Image: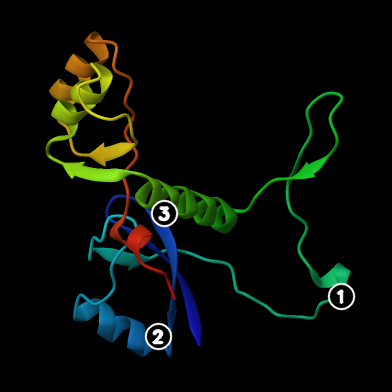
Amino acid sequence: MKVFDLSCERGHAFEGWFASAEAFDEQIARSLVHCPVCESAKVRRTPSAPRLNLSNAPEARPSQPVAKAPGAQTTAMPTDTQLRALWLEAARHLVRNTEDVGERFAEEARRIHYQEAPERGIRGVTTAEQRAELADEGIDVFSFPIPAAAEEPLQ
């Protein structure tokens, strides 16, 4: 099994597991490899360190970077993989706990703000102009791109 570090045209980094380097090349040629964040099929391998499974002995495990605020306890910083997993879980949480109103987002946000519709979490699509208009009306919104993979379990 080969594990490759990959990146899409938008710079989203992720891992791909393939039977061989040839299997990777074949799947790329057939546009079968997609970014789990934006679904782009323009994917490339990125430089990566070799993955060695030496043992479970503590001296064989790489140490993680450590961050320490003045007066705080020392804590291990999450790895890039852990951060991506946390981000994906946040996206899945948003999908599970909000209603997708699609292109009607700005209209529905106004209805909720002016108490013309029940208060609830919504998600959808707006233009930059619509977001600016909502902000002018005192309606707080934020952008959080949700990958299609957030709605499905990953391998």
**How far apart are the two marked residues, 1 and 3, measured between alpha carbons?**
35 Å
Callout in the foreground (2, 1): 1
* Callout in the foreground (2, 3): 3
Q: What residue appears at the point 12 percent right and 39 percent down from the top-left corner?
A: 103
State yes or no: discs 2 and 3 in contact (Cβ < 8 Å): no
To which residue does mark 3 refer? 92
Mark count: 3
In-image side of 89 versus 105 (left or right): right
**Residue at screen point 27% across, 82% down:** 27
Q: Quadrant of the C terminus?
A: bottom left
| Residue 14 x, y percent position in the rendering | 43, 62
Render colour scheme: rainbow
- Say what amino acid the circle numbered 2 marks: Ala
Q: Which residue is mark 2?
A: 21
Looking at the picture, tell me which residue is in the foreground, 108 or 81. 108
Q: Earlier in the sequence, mark 2 or mark 1?
A: 2
Identify the residue position indicated by label 1 in the image.
Answer: 57
Q: CA distance from mark 2 to mark 1?
A: 30 Å
